[in-house]
Amino acid sequence: MNIRLEKKENCIATLSIEVPAETVTKERSQVIKAFMSQAKIPGFRPGKAPKAVIEKRHGEDISAEVENRLFQNSIQQALKENEELEVLNVKNPQNVTHSADGTFSFDADLILSPEFELPEYKGLAIEIPKVDVTEEIIDQNLEQLQQRFADYKDIEDRTLEDGDLAVIDFTGTVDGKPLDEVGGEQAKPLASNEGYWIRIEDEAFFPGFTDELVGCKVDDEKEIKITLPEDFPIEALRGQEALFAVKVTGMKTETLPELNDEFAEKIDPGKTLEEVKELISEDLKMQQSRKVEEFKINAVLAKLHENIDFELPEEFIAAETQGQADSMVQEGMQSGMSEEDIAERQEELFAGAQERAKNNLKTNFLLQKIAAAEEIKVDNNAVLQRITAMAKQAKQPVKKYMKQIQNDGTLSNVRQNMLFSNAIDFLLEHASISEVEPKPEETEEN
């Protein structure tokens, strides 16, 4: 057998294989024998039909089976001779030729795992924001709970003042067009609303908006002009002057409950205020801990990415990009985007999906190679525990769920994801992690 291998760009190699005539003849003979033993031909007992009759009746099927066996055997032999290759996939044969001298030849493209030398991955220096659950943060959460139990009363003897709540109907336009017509589905909540509650304070809705409502009373109507900021989330509305037609339909004062044990009883029966504050503190610490762990993972992977770049298989990029694009479209529709909005932003979405896809694939290949270098494994018992938990979440018997994920290929994904998780744990264990004071915007977010 003549085997020639040519490596190309983008993780592709082409196998060119020529199978000798005697091998082709031998394989064909074996296939015909198999057909003779199984074929049912009218007028002949099973297995007794003449070879010529079998070839005439099943010629196409015999030739297809011969080619398939030659493909499989030849490629298997070629990969055995080139075992240093990390082959991810073998594509369908091309340039299939039956020569006059009886030889059989074809080409087959191989998709290879990227070739690269691992950068230094132990001792990666990463910084994480220092997070403390302060009394101030606990008090802010208590204030939010107070809001849930607030008492609201109609204002009847005066006009709106700072700190009051206004109930308004409004419509928003730009150059006479409804905001959602200009800004798409995302702008729909700003285009019109009825019975909208808004607190009279500087930053409510848009800066300066509620200043125009001070001194109003029920049934008053006003037109309020707002220049939308240059960093407004909806690109089509950035810097635009919006006109809001507003009618005040209600005015209310808010009375918050006192922060005492009686209030704590409403939140969690049997608890004192101090106990409720302790519960809030524990919950916040858990939330912050999850955020910090997520931040660590993103930081260590970003640092790993900084130190290396390599080619990725184009076919894998295409498949992953499509998956990411589908996810982004779904996310967009769930957030209120229309099909028209998505169509308008198709190029932007595709570019974002492709970037995500490349990052994901690069991360996967890096983690896989690190796992191999450090002999990181996935324990079978751990896999079983994970699948048991997944079956419980899916409300299915474990055996039935196991069979299902074996059939649809999900089982290998579960094991691979656990391997990647173990590799990330290894990176974090060997990383140099330092805490830094968070930036002002991070502090505000927390």
Image (spheres, grey):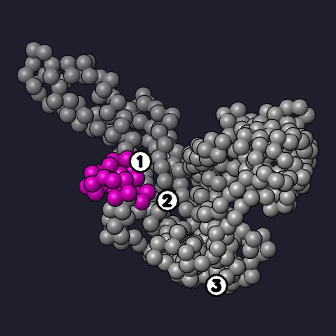
Circle 1 residue? 75
Q: Is residue 326 above or below residue 264?
A: above
Specify whether residue 395 is painted magenta. Answer: yes
Q: Which mark is residue 85?
A: 2
How far apart, in angstroms, are the residues tagged by discs 3 and 1?
46 Å
Q: Quadrant of residue 199?
A: bottom right
| 87, 128: nearer the viewer | 128
How far apart, in angstroms, are the residues tagged by discs 2 and 3?
35 Å
Name the element at disc 2. loop
- Return the x and y of residue 435 as percentages of the image width and height: 69, 84
Q: Earlier in the sequence, mark 3 or mark 1?
A: 1
Local packing at callout 1 (Cα closer than 10 Å; few below 14, some 14-19, many 20+) is: many
Amino acid type of the residue that numbered disc 1 sits on in the rendered structure? Ile
At x 25%, y 18%, the residue is: 57
* Quadrant into which the C terminus falls: bottom right
Circle 3 residue? 432
**What range is drawn magenta here?**
391-414
Local packing at callout 2 (Cα closer than 10 Å; few below 14, some 14-19, many 20+) is: some
Local packing at callout 3 (Cα closer than 10 Å; few below 14, some 14-19, many 20+) is: some
Amino acid type of the residue that numbered disc 2 sits on in the rendered structure? Leu
